């Protein structure tokens, strides 16, 4: 994942975590985020949902939340209240599944559960808590993967004497032909394997950010 890819993903995550508070600040309190449809902050609601849906669609295990988020946006709660509520419930359920499909980040999962139960008492606050949990999950995951990519910020050379300050140099002898575990393509280069348990798992650079 290059710096540009990391940057736009982080921007979307931060925006998604802040937009509920922007709605509160600019349009006052409503019973739910969907209730801001038709208000002065409707464009913020739509833009945030579209950006997050795109982000989810490019993230492994988050395509279903992406689809339901688009449906929640397309069928607003004013013209289609019943179907909108169904899609909203489905979104939080499939997000729950995607979140708990990862074995890490226990505290974030607990935060999501708190948000889910809070919805019973106060829908808006519960939604905000769940959104913050999802945002934190993707922030930690993205930062971890970016750190792994930076560890592999290398130049393939034949002469180790060409090493520059801050670079980690590998010789061409360390390159190999392997099959990427995710995309199944034949790749010639340095393998990405940061999982000490699954020793036979190898990732190409393009698929590294999809590691769970």
Image (tube, rainbow, N blue to C red):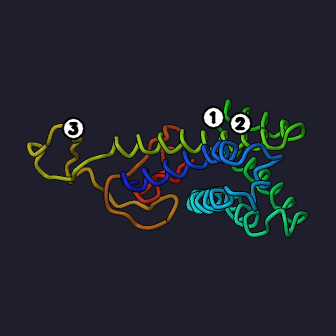
List the residue tagged with mark 2: 109
Q: Nearer the viewer, residue 78 or 169?
A: 78
- Label 1: few (<14), some (14–19) or many (≥20) C-alpha neighbours in 10 Å: some
Q: Which mark is residue 105?
A: 1
Dividing the picture into quadrants, the one containing residue 111 is top right
Dividing the picture into quadrants, the one containing residue 89 is bottom right
Q: Closer to the N terminus: mark 2 or mark 3?
A: 2
Q: Nearer the viewer, residue 27 or 108?
A: 27
Q: How far is disc 3 from disc 1 in space, using C-alphas?
A: 31 Å
List the residue tagged with mark 3: 166
User: Which type of secondary structure does the marked residue at label 2 adopt?
Assistant: helix
Residue 88 in the image: state x and y as whole percent. Answer: 80, 57
76 to 139, vertically: above or below? below
Q: Is residue 147 shown left or right of residue 166?
A: right
Q: Closer to the N terminus: mark 3 or mark 1?
A: 1
Q: Nearer the viewer, residue 140 or 78?
A: 78
User: Which type of secondary structure does the marked residue at label 1 adopt?
Assistant: loop
Residue appearing at x 19%, y 49% in the figure: 171
Q: Are marks 2 and 3 in contact (CB under 8 Å)?
A: no
């Amino acid at each position: 994942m290059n710096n540009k890819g990391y940057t736009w993903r982080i921007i979307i995550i931060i925006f998604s975590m802040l937009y509920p508070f922007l709605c509160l600040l600019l349009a006052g309190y409503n019973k739910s985020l969907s209730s801001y449809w038709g208000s002065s902050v409707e464009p913020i609601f739509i833009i945030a949902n579209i950006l997050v849906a795109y982000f989810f669609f490019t993230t492994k295990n988050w395509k279903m939340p992406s689809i339901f988020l688009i449906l929640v946006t397309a069928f607003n709660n004013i013209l289609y209240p019943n179907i909108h509520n169904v899609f909203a419930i489905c979104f939080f359920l499939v997000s729950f599944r995607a979140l708990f499909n990862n074995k890490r980040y226990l505290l974030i999962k607990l935060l999501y559960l708190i948000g889910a139960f809070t919805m019973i008492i106060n829908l808006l606050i519960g939604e905000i808590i769940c959104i913050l949990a999802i945002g934190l999950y993707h922030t930690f995951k993205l930062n971890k993967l970016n750190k792994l990519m930076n560890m592999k910020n290398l130049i393939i050379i034949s002469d180790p004497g060409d090493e520059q300050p801050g670079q980690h140099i590998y010789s061409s002898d360390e390159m190999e032909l392997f099959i990427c575990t995710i995309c199944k393509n034949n790749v010639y280069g340095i393998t990405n394997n940061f999982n000490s348990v699954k020793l036979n798992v190898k990732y190409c650079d393009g698929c590294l950010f999809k590691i769970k």
